[in-house]
Amino acid sequence: MSGLKSSIENPWVCDIVTDEVLARETGVPLPSHAQSDQAFCTPHALRSWARAFLPAGGWSGPLRHVRVRQNGQLQALIPFARQQVARFSINSLAGYYWPFRSLCLLAQPGAGMGLADAVGRALANTPPGAVLRFGPISGRDEVMLAMLRQLMAAGWRHRAKATGAVFQLDLSLGLDALKQRFSGSLLKHIEYSRRRLSKTVGEVRCERHVLSGEDQPLLDILAGIESRSWLGRDGGDLKFVGPANQLFWTQMGREPDPHAQAVCWVLHCGDQPVAFSAHLETDTALYVLANSYDEQWKSHSPGSILTYEVLRDAIARHKRLFDWGQGDSGYKQRWGAQEGALLYDVMMFRPGLLGDLLALAAEKALRDWDVRLDALP
């Protein structure tokens, strides 16, 4: 399917291809995301998600991309798959839910808003459907927001809601400055717990693993810890238990990219794996996707011991952003984390009879989706 046509006046070309066609035509791993904070959004990561989770949970394949090229060079991919929403099957922005969904930007750093505007115009001309859903998307994803504003300028209507803020730490402050923001007794409690464990159980060690695609023993350890955590006990949202989750992380470890790594830390007490923390890491940012500990060890604060080691290591490797995701029962604020960007869920409706009818139906059904994209900073 072809959209924007290339010409001397307009060097942009846009079409829609399946992921299978994209992989066959590309043949080699594509370069990392142009925005280093969001380098986790790559064709490989999307492919890993699709292989593990399509079809499941209301989603169905195939994974498709709106492909945007300039003068023959691939600039951006907008990934979509089908998602069941109420009685409708619509095209939704594809990818792993955490830390948020985005575009694959493959242009050189500094392409900026000019690229965003071009991508928005391309999508307006070659949409995969009359209704498009984007979520969760980040309020600090400037290219995404600029693209959606281009759709609005082309006559698309929208409904949007904020789903909550993420909690963040500014690692560029350095460890000493961050310690001043920790709650008063936090470090003393960590030191005490570590000494007590060393005396009563054995060596306390924290191991960092960059996934390689050959990680089954590690994945089994993580699944074991998670199954013994409060999430496993209460039937929560598990990230490592089950074949689909295991396949996702196995796939993520393949085609290693030094600019976008899947990383898992494990805390061992003696010979027992007790806690883990799983991340996506870019050159500049660390996104926490999951962390859990074995409930039997709760009184020893294994999560706090591991978090402190993760923070120290991230600062030593010159990360600037520590993104802890949404939700906080008070634990994240003990570390000085503050509310950062809001995440949003957005539905866009193409101009025309079908899109207008669906927009009217959504207006009645989604009354709490009342955020105006044109009012966001």
Image (cartoon, rainbow, N blue to C red):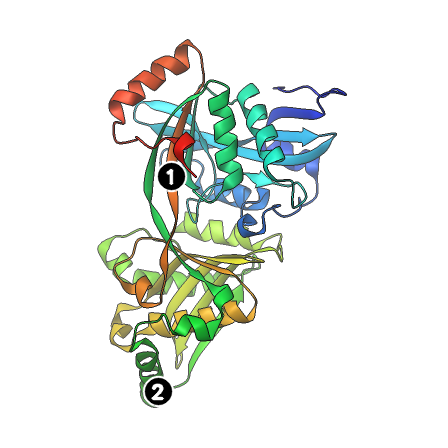
Decide: is 206 above or below 41: below
Cα–Cα gap, marks 1 and 2? 43 Å
The answer to whether any part of residue 62 appears in the image is no
* Residue at left offset 24%, top offset 76%: 299
User: Are circles 1 and 2 on residues that touch, CB within 8 Å?
Assistant: no
Rendering coords of residue 70 (x, y %):
70, 30
Report the side of 299 relative to 199 (left or right): left
Q: Quadrant of the C terminus?
A: top left
Observer able to see residue 98: yes
Name, please, the residue furthest toward the right: 8
Residue nearest the viewer, comparing 301 with 267: 301
Q: Which residue is located at x 31 percent, y 63 percent?
A: 333
Query: Foreground: 185 or 279?
Result: 185
Quickly name the residue at label 1. 344
How dense is the environment of label 1, judged by Cα within 10 Å: few (below 14), some, or many (20 and up)?
many
| Tag 1: amino acid | Tyr
The numbered mark at residue 195 is: 2
Q: How many marks?
A: 2
Q: Residue extending furthest left?
A: 234
Helix, strand or loop status at disc 2: helix
Discs 1/2, front:
1
What's under tag 2, amino acid-wise?
Answer: Arg
Q: Where is residue 160 drawn, in percent x and y? A: 35, 31
How packed mark 2 is, by other alpha carbons closer than 10 Å (few <14, some 14-19, many 20 or more), is some
Q: Residue furthest top?
A: 353
Task: Give the SS element for disc 1.
Answer: strand
Q: Nearer the viewer, residue 336 or 255?
A: 336
Q: For the N terminus, which image quadrant?
A: top right
**On screen, residue 240 above or below 201:** above
